[in-house]
């Protein structure tokens, strides 16, 4: 799922089951939305209408959901290969190389991270625009890899996209994605020029100093 060029994946382009509040959702999308619903329950700001829509297998959310902010410490002294090894992935795409995805930075830098979740089909371009409008930047591959190392179970909940690092791979622009295959944790490299469906989360970052 979300793997390479498989257009049947749950993050692939699709015209089905993507209209917010307008269609009956399959179990796969309900699983993704349940994480958001639980998050809102924890925060104490869920409404009865949202709960009612969810129980009727409909999308309870009309706008982008912003998750709590968390910290990501990037060690720029590490190479890309070392960052991938630290994540202990069951599979990592061999086309993710230093030549295609150079790591640029010095020392250890702390970033703030947050998920953007649209609950509907959205393009890479629109997702980036929404992040920037909110004062965030799409995560680079080093941010994604630090997330995978520090929070290894996150990608078992939903696919996590890093739109800040884009490389030409066999003629197609591609981006790194953390995802799963059954219980295995995978580091994929699907196309940038596509639509992403509801379960996907987009990792956004900002330098800690800029958040002050």
Image: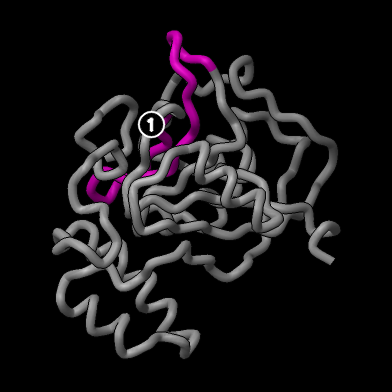
Horizontal relation, residue 27 to residue 49: left or right: left
Residue count near mark 1 (Cα–Cα under 10 Å), binned few <14, some 14–19, many ≥20? some
Q: Which residues are magenta?
A: 168-189
Residue identified by numbered label 1: 194
Give how far across and how far down residue 116 sits, in percent.
51, 57
Horizontal relation, residue 44 to residue 75: left or right: left
Give how far across and how far down residue 126 sits, in percent.
50, 43
Q: In the figure, 82 relative to 87: above or below? A: above
Q: Quadrant of the N terminus?
A: top left
Q: In the figure, 165 relative to 34: above or below? A: above
Asked if residue 56 lies in the magenta stretch, the reply is no
Q: Quadrant of residue 114?
A: bottom right
Callout 1: SS: loop
Q: In the figure, 48 relative to 191: above or below? A: below
Decide which of 144, 197 is in the foreground and name it: 197
Asked if residue 172 lies in the magenta stretch, the reply is yes
Please report the residue visible at 57 percent of the width from the left and 70 percent of the height from the top.
68
Please report the residue visible at 38 percent of the width from the left and 31 percent of the height from the top.
194
How would you classify the magenta stretch by its main secondary structure? strand
Q: Quadrant of residue 36?
A: bottom left
Give how far across and how far down residue 143 sits, in percent.
63, 45
Decide which of 127, 168 is in the foreground and name it: 127
């Amino acid at each position: 799922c979300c793997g390479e060029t498989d257009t049947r994946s749950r993050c692939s382009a699709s015209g089905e089951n993507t209209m917010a509040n307008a269609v009956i959702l399959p179990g796969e999308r309900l699983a993704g939305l349940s994480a958001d619903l639980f998050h809102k329950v924890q925060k104490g700001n869920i409404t009865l209408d949202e709960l009612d829509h969810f129980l009727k297998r409909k999308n309870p959310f009309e706008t982008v959901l912003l998750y709590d902010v968390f910290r990501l410490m990037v060690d720029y002294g590490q190479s890309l290969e070392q960052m991938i090894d630290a994540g202990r992935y069951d599979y990592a795409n061999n086309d993710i190389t230093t030549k295609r995805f150079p790591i640029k930075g010095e020392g250890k830098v702390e970033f703030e991270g947050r998920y953007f979740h649209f609950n509907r089909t959205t393009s890479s371009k629109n997702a980036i625009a929404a992040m920037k409008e909110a004062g965030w930047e799409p995560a680079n591959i080093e941010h994604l890899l630090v997330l995978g190392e520090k929070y290894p179970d996150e990608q078992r909940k939903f696919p996590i996209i890093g739109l800040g690092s884009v490389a030409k791979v066999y003629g197609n622009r591609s981006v790194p994605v953390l995802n799963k295959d059954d219980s295995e944790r995978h580091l994929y490299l699907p196309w940038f020029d596509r639509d992403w469906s509801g379960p996907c989360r987009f990792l956004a970052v900002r330098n800690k100093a800029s958040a002050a």
